[in-house]
Amino acid sequence: MGKRARRYDSDGDSDGDEDPQPSSRKEMVTAAAGTAGQGQGFKNKEKVLILSTRGITYRYRHLMNDLISLIPHSKKDSKLDTKNDRGVINEVADMKSCTSVLFFEVRKRMDLYLWVAKSPDGPSAKFHVANIHTMSELKLSGNHLKGSRPVLSFHKAFDEQPHLQLLKEIFTQMFATPKRHHKSKPFFDHVLSFSVADGRIWFRNYQVVVPLDKKKVDPESVTLVEVGPRFCLNPVRIFDGAFGGRTLYENPGYVSPNAVRAALKKKVAGKYVAKVQARQARKEHTAANPMPRSELEDLFLGGGQGSEEGDE
């Protein structure tokens, strides 16, 4: 038997309960797009590019690897050859589809500077990194899942000054793992702490430890155990563009490491100069004030000669 043909009324509706099919390809595409867009809101596509300059030391490289493990939505690139033309970093970020950049710049194989930038339009900030302790050095007892989403904790001072408010927003976009990221795990088991003290930003990473004997998690019973790494960021400047542009903020209390080393050398050299000057002053004083000749200086010498003459 052949299939029964479907009947349509004069207005185009079928006799059955099925919906009519779209009459054109354009209507099909529109319907598919509307179905796909239902139930979906803003999707965070934040990606962080992490790279360094050539000449980076092993301790700084370990710190960079620690941050890569803490940021699952990061992408690593090869070392950068140039130290002056930082505009190339924006091109690399564009090729990697990254919107943020963490750039480790090493000077004289001793000083580490960290550039935190939003690519390609900015803003960006330059920090001097000090008090570095990597996870391999600390050997702390804390531990957490790799790729888990962190809880960001900021000191209340971040809401008091404009430049700290800007840095808080940049750190939030970089270190907050996007929801449902394919490399992340849907757990909150560690806290990234940003504290302000002495005009500097102190970074710490803590594990959230929940008591195993309690079925229901109580926030009061949760403890924090440090995992690492830890470092200190001393702000140098904040620019309105990516790796340059108009200066938005300049730290008046910042002293470059070169100036600190020069002061130490001058202090050490000052001690040596003081010793030389004291020795020279002693010689001049001795020459200007000779000791008077003693009357008994040749007593024994003269007595010996006189006895010899008497024997003869």
Image: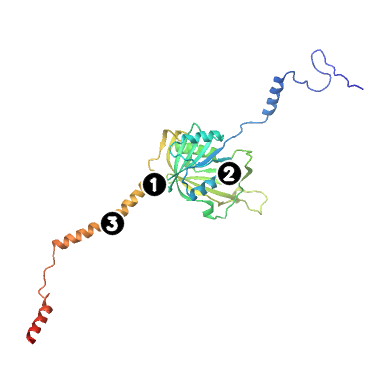
The amino acid sitting under disc 1 is Pro
The colour scheme is rainbow
The C terminus - image quarter: bottom left
Residue 268: numbered disc: none
Q: How many neighbours does mark 3 have within 10 angstroms: few (below 14), some (14-19), or many (20 or more)? A: few
Is residue 309 visible from the viewing direction of this image? yes
Q: Which residue is drawn at 54% across and 37% down?
A: 173
Residue holding disc 3:
272
Q: Quadrant of the N terminus?
A: top right
Is 88 in front, or is 240? Answer: 88
- Determine the CA span between mark 3 and mark 2: 53 Å
For marks 2 and 1, give the one nearer the viewer: 1
Name the residue at 55% across, 38% down.
48
Q: Where is residue 7 in the image (x, y as percent from the top left)?
A: 85, 17
Residue at image position (58%, 50%) is 207
For label 2, the SS is strand
Asked if the residues shown at circle 2 and circle 1 are in contact, with their CB atoms under 8 angstroms apart, the answer is: no
Residue labelled with disc 2: 150
- Image coordinates of residue 240 in percent, x first then y, are 45, 32
Q: Distance between the residues labelled 2 and 1?
A: 33 Å
Mark 3 belongs to which amino acid?
Answer: Tyr
Q: In this view, does 257 lie above or below 297?
A: above
Given residues 163 and 117, the one toward you in this image is 117
| Element assignment for label 3 | helix
Q: Position of residue 90 (x, y in %)?
A: 50, 34
Please state which amino acid type lies under the numbered disc 2. Pro
Marks 3 and 2 in Cβ contact (< 8 Å)? no
Residue matched to label 1: 257
Few, some or many residues within 10 Å of mark 2 (<14, 14–19, 20+):
many
Which secondary structure lies at badge 1? helix
Q: Position of residue 187 (x, y in %)?
A: 63, 44
Question: If you read the primary sequence from the N terminus, does the residue marked by circle 2 or circle 1 appear first?
Answer: 2
